[in-house]
Amino acid sequence: MGKAHTENGGDNLIGIIGGGLAGLSLAYHLKDSIVIEAKDRVGGLLRSERIEGYTFDTGGSHILFSRDENALKELVNMIGSVVEHRRRTFIFYNGRFIKYPFENGIYMLPKEERFEILYDFFMNYVKRKEKPKNLLEWFYYVFGRAITEKYLKPYNEKLWKTDLRRITLEWVGNRIPNPPVEDILKSCVGIPTEGYKHQLKFYYPLEGGIETLARNLAKRCRVVTGERINKIEREDGVFILKGKREYICDKVVSTIPIDVTAKMLGLNVRLSYNPLTVVGLGGKGDLPDFHWIYVPDKDIVFHRIAFLHNYSPNMAPEGKINIIAEVSGRAEVEDVIEGLEKMGFDVEVEVAMKWEWDYAYIVFDETYEKVEEIRNFLMENGIIPFGRFGNWEYLNMDAVWIKAKELAKVL
Ligand SMILES: Cc1cc2nc3c(=O)[nH]c(=O)nc-3n(C[C@H](O)[C@H](O)[C@H](O)COP(=O)(O)OP(=O)(O)OC[C@H]3O[C@@H](n4cnc5c(N)ncnc54)[C@H](O)[C@@H]3O)c2cc1C
């Protein structure tokens, strides 16, 4: 181990562990900080790789949208040149594509099925009594049996990989579209509507994939890459962050998974989360003009595929296609290709890559109860937890940005 890296020490220096969006957004809003990132490049989940003319977002499909106009504007400005889109997103349901969210796509189903959904929704609505206590009960309570069993249950079981009765309602908030009754009724009688409206318009970088956002932020921050912190010590009122070198800081914010930070300080905890495999495929094919597709089908390995060549024309060579498939858990490239075939897509693959992430989806099961305790433990030790995994919260990019601004003010 090298000597204390005194160049980085100094009055009020804030050490930020992790150079994903959380670490970078916070550093951007602070005066004196240093971001220490384990990998050779910043970005975390916002990484993109260019391979033979194809740019793949290796952490899955990332688009920029927000209810907060101000945050959205600031993030778009940070990217620079963007492409603005109106969402074209579908669900692969019983061999056909229906518009997302499912309850807004019902109008595309046969009459008999629309009636079945309407009848179920109505009967459930008039009988609603006990408040739901878990995710599965919530689906039945809000949407009725037909929508739950046709789409929400199979899709969410595939994503969460657990019995949905184990998932608490902590995370539901604005995450799952909770549509107005009027929309469902309209859709059932055949009138098109739009749901999850704050995502209907979204932005995407014109060049470089989603990593452009991280790269542009990093240009405005002090960042060290290729430096994995594996120990945090406190001595004479300062913190020493230990990796290959040592970083002396007055305050520490950790954006790396909260269980990992806790372990560095001697607390062993087990939290539930699902890993993610992203498979990127470049080549030729005749694909619909969609942005992404949700796939509830149990026989198909991925739960979502995104057509990145429709996000920006620069994501693939002219006339070529760029697909990323997201699998909750682990899978092989061949499984994804097989899944595409099952969906009826004929793709001539020229480039195939796979990326694996350990932390992707926090599972809000009974282990989540411990999180507050872990946060308090870190704070008692002077470490501020922050970020999607850092503070164990279900945060999208806009929420990370907003919270970074708030935290910077406090610091
Ligand atoms: C599949 C998927 C799709 C998503 N799509 C969207 C979307 O469309 N729109 C949207 O707004 N949000 C989306 N999100 C959410 C978005 O990815 C997160 O809000 C954001 O990336 C969280 O950033 P973070 O910095 O908290 O975490 P991370 O990106 O995980 O960053 C943590 C960083 O810490 C580093 N690190 C780990 N251990 C150490 C160590 N010991 N020392 C130093 N560094 C370390 C890691 O290498 C990493 O760079 C999506 C998330 C997923 C999983």
Image: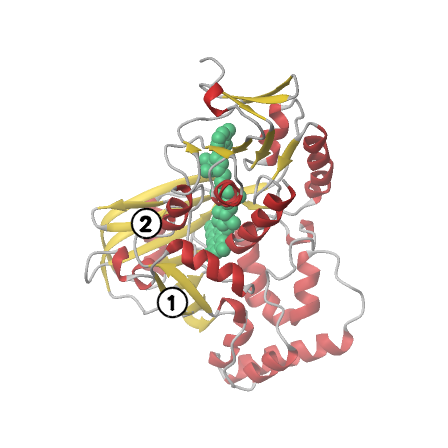
Which residue lies under the disc numbered 2? 56
Q: Is residue 199 left or right of residue 141?
A: left
Q: For the image shown, how many numbered marks are present on the structure?
A: 2
Q: Is residue 68 visible?
A: yes
Mark 2 or 1, closer to the camera = 1
Nearer to me, 70 or 289: 70
* Mark 1: amino acid: Glu
Q: Quadrant location of residue 85?
A: bottom left
Q: Secondary structure at mark 1?
A: strand
Q: Position of residue 257 (x, y in %)?
A: 56, 36
Q: Which mark is residue 325?
A: none
Q: Which quadrant does the C terminus fall into?
A: top right
Quote the CA–CA distance across marks 2 and 1: 19 Å
Is ligand 1 closer than 8 angstroms to the Cβ of mark 1? no
N-term-proximal mark, 2 vs 1 = 2
Q: Is residue 296 visible?
A: no
Q: Position of residue 161 (x, y in %)?
A: 56, 48
- The relative height of residue 175 versus residue 5 in the rendered view (above or below) is below
Q: Which mark is residue 84?
A: 1
Is ligand 1 closer than 8 angstroms to the Cβ of mark 2? no
Q: Secondary structure at mark 2?
A: strand
Q: Position of residue 350 (x, y in %)?
A: 21, 50
Q: Residues within 10 Å of mark 2 (few under 14, many from 20)?
A: many
The residue sitting at the right extreme is 129
Q: Are marks 2 and 1 in contact (CB under 8 Å)?
A: no
- The relative height of residue 250 versus residue 292 in the rendered view (above or below) is above
Q: Residues within 10 Å of mark 1 (few under 14, many from 20)?
A: some
Q: Quadrant location of residue 341?
A: bottom left
Nearer to me, 47 or 33: 33
Q: Position of residue 206 (x, y in %)?
A: 31, 59
* Mark 2: amino acid: Phe
